[in-house]
Image: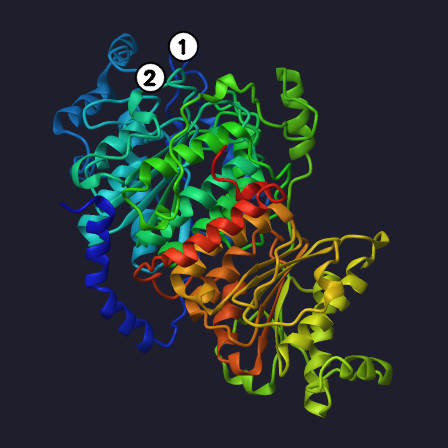
Amino acid sequence: MRGGWEAGRTRRLRSSTARAGIRMAENRPPRPQGTALIYDKDMTRVRLLWDDPECGIEVPERLTSTYARLSHRGLVQRCVRLPAREATEEELELVHSPEYVAVVKGTQTMSKEELQTLAQQYDAVYFHPSTFPCARMAVGATLQLVDAVLTGAVGNGMALVRPPGHHSQRDAANGFCVFNNVAIAAEHAKRRHGLQRILIVDWDIHHGQGTQRVFESDPSVLYFSWHRYEHQSFWPRLRESDYDAVGQGPGRGFTVNVPWNKVGMRNADYVSVFLHVLLPLAIEFDPELVLVSAGFDSGIGDPEGQMKATPECFAHLTLLLLPLARGRLCAVLEGGYHLQSLAECVCLTLQTLLGDPVPPLSGDPTPCLSALESIQNVRAAHVPHWASLRHEETGPVLTPSTQRGDTGASLLGAQSLGTTDRVGSLLDKLLSCPISLPYPDIGLAVPDSAASFNLPPALLQEKDVALSKEEAATWARLDSAFTEDQAFADLGKLLALLDKILTGQIRAGIAVSPSVSAALAVALRRGLSLGAQRCDPDIGIRSVFSRLLCVAIGDLDVPEDLRDNGQILLLNIGGKETAPTPTCICLAGHEATEPGAFLLALTSLILPVAYNFQPELVLVVLGPGCSLRSLDVELLTRLLQGPAAGRMLLLLQNSELPLVEALAWALAGRALPSALGPFFSASPKQALAVTHLCRQLQLDWPMLQVSVT
């Protein structure tokens, strides 16, 4: 009998040949780049009519204040506005029973006393005479968004809706939720659009047990939820919310629960779970659509969550999801009860959907012990179902984290959130100056022959830049390739491009060189010399670039003085064997760039180290012997835009010139033009090499940890 993963893998492999042929034949048609926003003030009509402290936090201002903030930030104006509509009763019955739909429909004519009596039959719910039309509109708005994304009218989008939905079950309202907006949308996507693989990411701080129950036997939906659990003491206090609830029957392995057993989880904890649990499974699952149950009660200051994740964390989570499903991502509002925090988290999420660079991730990049226990438990529970986890040999944690005395480091060093006044003060400090990053252009330093490529419109191509005699002599000593006029012209373009990135004139760029090893040394030295200073017209010279991450793929020679430089972290994948140090990490051999080994290294090694290092600039270099698929290079480019707020330089050899077009679109934020395709597992030898290297380095780079042992 096949497990859930094996059945899904068999289904995907049956169509892999056809999909590969499509990818080879297509000429990279542009994907839609519009971001949809759906909001309708009619969804604010519902409000609590009696005194109920538990339900009193679900207020219309959750929508109105958030929408006002989006408008103030200019984000509404940049979105494609889609009208909301009310879902039909037939659409509601994709998930809910006709009898339950009839009960909710009847609330339209009930008195206040009758509404209160009905609400008491459910858990943490209130009703209003406008509940039925508002709840229908919440579902309809979600369906409008899904239809627009799946028909190609827009690339992605967000629906600001209420009532929320992920607690709602087939026959019952629950936890402020009346109809299950996201579950209905997933069923709609399968039945109307023929989708076979849908990923639901529920980052609300409460477990979406309603969504889980709808799909727990369904291998076509991968449901991921993290939630405050505290060993079953936090609402909804269900045994099925723990890490070992993995689905039923053919759906085993397709329910992924990450229980938070402590409050105070921070940015590093959230990102670690995405890197070590969700991303490997999602890449293997290869969804055709991503639905996010976007509850922001998991953000800082929320009275329900009591967590410490700051608003920019949700931008990073969104960025990590966007390479999936060709960028077809629909975020649907769930919880979020601190109005200021909610609005700012929504703003940062929407900015990322719009393609803006994400702000730097703040806070200590070290996951706490309680988070590591949850990661270890979840991975162990899912090893039988997913090939991407089978290189691990760790078992579940048996000692509860509460006995370890671990409360997790506070967000701002030794300070603690403690009291309500302290929370308010910290939030004011974090949110009083809203993050509004510029999104400057992308630059190219490539041969003129690249002018015939289909390139993004907002792109600056460097012209020939003359080098001084002193510079020419210096660089000529590095490599014999720098002896011809054209080589010096290419080098001049590279230096001009790097200078613009380092001085903030552009965000990212691509350079091509006849000798990539020598060009790498030039770029690193230039980065060190200019990185210590940045000219700012308002405040003059200031130090900003103190950490440069270099991800080098293939055989590349880096001078010894640059290998041991404290400002540079070198990650070499596929190069020659060298002894690893905290700042020079090598995963050697040609096999390291094979698809399965590289994907494992990407999620287990490259991204955790990059987020731990917190670089100000990322340099990605494709050298001799680089055999990565174009798809893998694009995926690497997209995911590494997070740690350095999008500041990136890609350095290619002349032979890699055809990659320029694809990578330029990747830097511009365009979604992958095709699905990720069939999943490749790392060989046992390569899996062991990656795991061994991560264990060697995890004391220096704590985000490599996936267990407490």
Which residue appears at 31% of the width and 51% of the height?
285
Q: Say few, some or many: other residues with alpha carbon within 10 Å of mark 2 (under 14 / 14 to 19 / 20 or more).
A: many
Q: In the image, 513: left or right of 482? A: left
How far across and down, in percent of the image, does residue 539 sit?
85, 51
Total labels: the figure holds 2
Q: Quadrant of the N terminus?
A: top left
Residue at coordinates 34% horizontally, 16% vertically from top-left?
124
Residue at the disc numbered 2 = 126
Q: Position of residue 504 (x, y in %)?
A: 72, 60
Verify CB contact (< 8 Å) between mark 1 and mark 2.
yes
Mark pair 1, 2: CA separation: 9 Å
**Tag 2 secondary structure:** loop
Pick whichever, 79 or 463, lies toward us.
463
Residue 293, quarter of picture: top left
Classify 10 Å Cα crowding around label 1: few (below 14), some (14-19), many (20 and above): few
- Looking at the picture, which amino acid does disc 2 mark? Tyr
Q: Which residue is mark 1?
A: 52
User: Viewed as shown, does residue 483 lie left or right of 269?
Assistant: right
